[in-house]
Image (cartoon, helix red, strand yellow):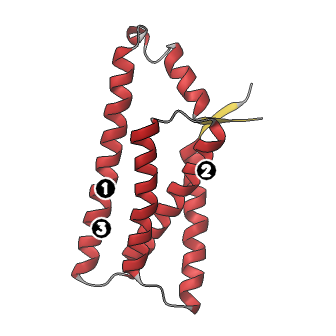
């Protein structure tokens, strides 16, 4: 029996770490503009947010994989923007990035809870078929 790994842990965080390392390397040769990095982060995040609202995660696992990589890159861009921003602007950038992350996670949690409450097996949570089906769609099996 294999272990299940969340796509966020298995894909998003490593892609964020790799992307951040690449950005740090690039910045050593070519100074990066933190504003442009933050704009790029918000553009990528916006693409992912629109996908979530319109399509509601109704994709195959491969597409989820790609969007987790995109979220990792988005996270790296936001972190690099924070690293490069100076003074009071850094505090503003941190607050802005955290506010967006909190709103995004609250939205996801509320959406998932609403879906769960409509399920006829809601009383059996977390040992219900709906959660198992969602987990299958958004996780990886390690052999």
Task: Name the residue beneath numbered marker 3.
Answer: 94
4, above or below 21, in the image = above
Query: Marks 2 and 1: which is nearer the front?
Result: 2
Q: Position of residue 19 (x, y in %)?
A: 58, 68
Q: Is residue 30 left or right of residue 35?
A: right
SS of the residue at dot 2? helix
139, above or below 20, in the image = above
Distance (Cα) linking label 2 and label 3: 26 Å
Task: Name the residue beneath numbered marker 1.
Answer: 100
Distance (Cα) linking label 2 and label 1: 21 Å
Q: Position of residue 99 (x, y in %)?
A: 26, 56
Q: Residue at x 53, y 85 (%)?
A: 27
N-terminal-most mark, 2 or 3:
2
| Neighbourhood count class around disc 2 (C-alpha, 10 Å): few under 14, some 14–19, many 20 upward | few
138, above or below 132, in the image = below
N-terminal-most mark, 3 or 1:
3
- Asked whether the beta carbons under mark 3 and mark 1 sit within 8 Å of each other, the answer is no
SS of the residue at dot 3? helix
Q: Position of residue 15 (x, y in %)?
A: 60, 59
Q: Residue at x 34, y 26 (%)?
A: 113
Task: Name the residue beneath numbered marker 2.
Answer: 66
Query: Marks 2 and 3: which is nearer the front?
Result: 2
User: In front here: 91 or 43?
Assistant: 43
**Image quarter of the N terminus:** top right
Q: Residue at x 42, y 63 (%)?
A: 43
- Asked whether the beta carbons under mark 2 and mark 3 sit within 8 Å of each other, the answer is no
Q: Quadrant of residue 45?
A: bottom left
Q: Quadrant of residue 47?
A: bottom left
Q: Is residue 24 left or right of residue 118?
A: right
94, above or below 67, in the image = below
């Amino acid at each position: 029996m294999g272990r299940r790994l969340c796509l966020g842990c298995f894909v998003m965080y490593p892609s964020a770490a790799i992307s951040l390392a690449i950005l740090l390397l690039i910045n050593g040769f070519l100074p990066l503009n933190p504003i442009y990095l933050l704009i790029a982060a918000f553009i990528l995040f916006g693409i992912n947010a629109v996908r979530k609202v319109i399509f509601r995660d109704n994709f195959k696992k491969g597409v989820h994989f790609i969007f987790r990589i995109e979220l990792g890159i988005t996270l790296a861009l936001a972190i690099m923007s924070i690293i490069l921003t100076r003074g009071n602007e850094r505090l503003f950038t941190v607050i802005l990035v955290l506010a967006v992350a909190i709103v995004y996670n609250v939205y996801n949690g509320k959406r998932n809870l609403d879906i769960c409450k409509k399920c006829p097996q809601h009383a059996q949570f977390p040992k219900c078929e709906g959660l198992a089906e969602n987990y299958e769609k958004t996780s990886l099996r390690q052999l």
